[in-house]
Amino acid sequence: MKIRTDFVSNSSSSSFVLWGKIYNRSELEEKLKNSEVKPEDADDFSVYEWLDEHADLEYDEFVVGDDDLVVGISPSKMDDNETLAEFKQRVLEKIKSTGLPIDDVKEIEFVKGVESDGEICIDY
């Protein structure tokens, strides 16, 4: 008998773990439409396309769902000699560099969940 010991997933879902910020997608889209960093076509606006065009994010630094958007950095990218406070500050600066609204390191939280078929299920 064989026992599977690695991660099992179907192709329509993926798990994620980030230190970052959760945004309500529709509220964020409205803020971005009215911001200084406006999308080229505000009528046909997609936050996913906006991030792709304006933000220097790697594939594992954001999760886009129908209702929510999570942006951050994986804890696996924390440096060996970096404190959690330093890492959260780095996450804050990364999010700020995208043009997304964020004011304080206190807004950075540990977020884990699953994205499946456009829905983000966050484990609180």
Image (cartoon, helix red, strand yellow):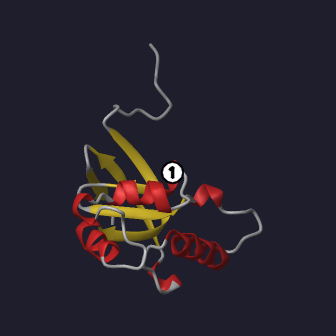
Name the amino acid, label 1: Asp
Identity of the residue furthest to the front in this view: 40
Q: Which is more toward the observer, 97 or 9?
A: 97
Residue 17 makes an appearance in the image:
no
Residue 61 makes an appearance in the image:
yes
Q: Position of residue 42 (x, y in %)?
A: 27, 65
Say whether residue 81 is left or right of residue 70. right
Query: Residue at image x 48%, y 73%?
Result: 99
Task: Give the structural element (helix, strand or loop) at label 1.
Answer: helix
58 to 34, vertically: above or below: above
Q: Quadrant of residue 36?
A: bottom left
Query: Residue at image x 48%, y 62%?
Result: 54
Identity of the residue furthest to the top in this view: 1
Name the image quarter holding the N terminus.
top left
Q: Quadrant of residue 46?
A: bottom left
Q: Position of residue 34 (x, y in %)?
A: 31, 78
Say whether residue 82 is left or right of residue 11. right
Identity of the residue furthest to the right in this view: 81
Say whether residue 101 is left or right of residue 56. left
Q: Quadrant of residue 12?
A: top left
Other residues around mark 1 within 10 Å, as few (<14) / some (14–19) / many (≥20) = few
Name the image quarter holding the C terminus.
bottom left
Query: Residue at image x 24%, y 57%?
Result: 44
Query: Residue at image x 29%, y 55%?
Result: 65
Q: Which is more toward the observer, 100 or 34?
A: 34
Say whether residue 34 is left or right of residue 81. left
* Image label count: 1
Q: Which residue is mark 1?
A: 60
39 to 92, vertically: above or below: above
